[in-house]
Amino acid sequence: MSSVHVDIADDAAAAATDGFYSPAKQKAANRRPTVLTIQRARQTLCAAKVKLILAVLTFSFIIYVSSKLSSFMGWNPHYPSFVSSPSRGGYTVLINSWKQSSVLKQSVAHYASCRSVERIHVSWSGSEPPSEKLIARLNEIAVLKSEGAQKADFIFEVISGDQLASRFRPKSYPNTDAIFSVDDNVIVPCPSLDFAFSVWQTAPLSMVGFVPRTHSVNKEQNNVAYYIYEGWWSVWWTGTYTMVLSKAAFFHRKYLDFYAHMSPSIQNYVANERSCEDIAMSLLVANVTGAPPVWVKGKIYEIGASSIGSLRGRSRLRNKCLNDLISHYGSMPLVPTNFKAVSAKNEWLW
């Protein structure tokens, strides 16, 4: 009796659910998972197609933005006629020295040991000429410390008249277009130097260096702006720079020719004013390119006593120099930027 009651209850439950029970309905119900699987597969395929299309569009947008950014930064693959082959050879280290024999020996020894250095050119400034013994010793150091079978060439130039601007006199260097201009008391580790060279190869029209500086507008009177030369802390605070100093920077050797052919008024001004030659070079390159320089992140070290950059009243002189040179140009050629070249090999997050 109880068995009959259970069967009746099951039939009632089935009837309540489907209205009635039949073998055909049961067979169709068994096929439903297969249909659902096909529908889900189609939905997954459609979603994958949408993602692929979005990925292609995103990649195309990135390529477009990169090309515009590269043009803005001066990273242009279509180089002017004076840029013959930015990727060929190594580079020349142009050391600006000022009466520091012991520091100069350390500097020559270090840069001769860097693998991509093909030439070391010492530009000696000062009223006292160097001894022949010093020159011979520096040449010996350059040969002994050179890496590989190719020894770095060594050139020693004595600048008459104690004029710092003469460091940028035109020079003829076979096989190297890149010049790394550096003060004698500044040491840049070889890996950082080679990385900066690789950055310069992508932007051979730009100055590429390790010491960024910026400027600000203090006030305007009679529609004439007065500019303030700002140091490192302003760069750190604002994240913006408009110059990289030639105390540690790459530039194309043709800029030495351009520097020699600047307006006579600018040349005379730089010759008569100390602490102006590097600002003049930054203004020159910016005026030629219409683009900002490139700051390379990297550690640099100063050895010995700071010589050229330790003059009293330097800030006042730099402000005067910046404003006077801009007046010669008639406008402000410096371009602000906040881009920084960083080697991904040395960064955990990038």
Image (cartoon, grey):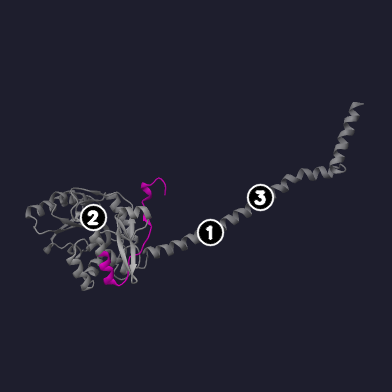
User: Within 10 Å of the Cα at label 2, are there few (<14), some (14-19), or many (20+) other Cα atoms?
Assistant: many
Q: Quadrant of residue 25?
A: top right
User: Within 10 Å of the Cα at label 3, are there few (<14), some (14-19), or many (20+) other Cα atoms?
Assistant: few
Q: What span is in magenta?
A: 321-350
Q: How many marks?
A: 3
Question: Are circles 2 and 3 on residues that touch, CB within 8 Å?
Answer: no
Is 338 rendered above or below residue 23?
Answer: below
The numbered disc on residue 56 is 1
Residue 204 in the image, given as x and y percentages of width and height: 31, 63
Asked which secondary structure carries label 3, the reply is helix
Mark earlier in primary sequence (1, 3): 3
The residue that mark 2 highlights is: 117
Asked which secondary structure carries label 2, the reply is strand
**Amino acid identity at mark 2:** Val
Q: Nearer the viewer, residue 145 or 330?
A: 330
**Amino acid identity at mark 1:** Val
> Is 297 displayed left or right of 60 in the figure?
left
Q: Quadrant of residue 13?
A: top right
Give the Cα distance between marks 2 and 3: 60 Å
Residue 158 in the image, given as x and y percentages of width and height: 12, 61
Residue drawn at x 23%, y 73% is: 263
Residue 236 in view, yes or no = yes
Asked if residue 148 is among those painted magenta in the image, a careful observer would answer no
Mark earlier in primary sequence (2, 3): 3
Q: Quadrant of residue 166?
A: bottom left
The residue that mark 3 highlights is: 41
Mark earlier in primary sequence (2, 1): 1
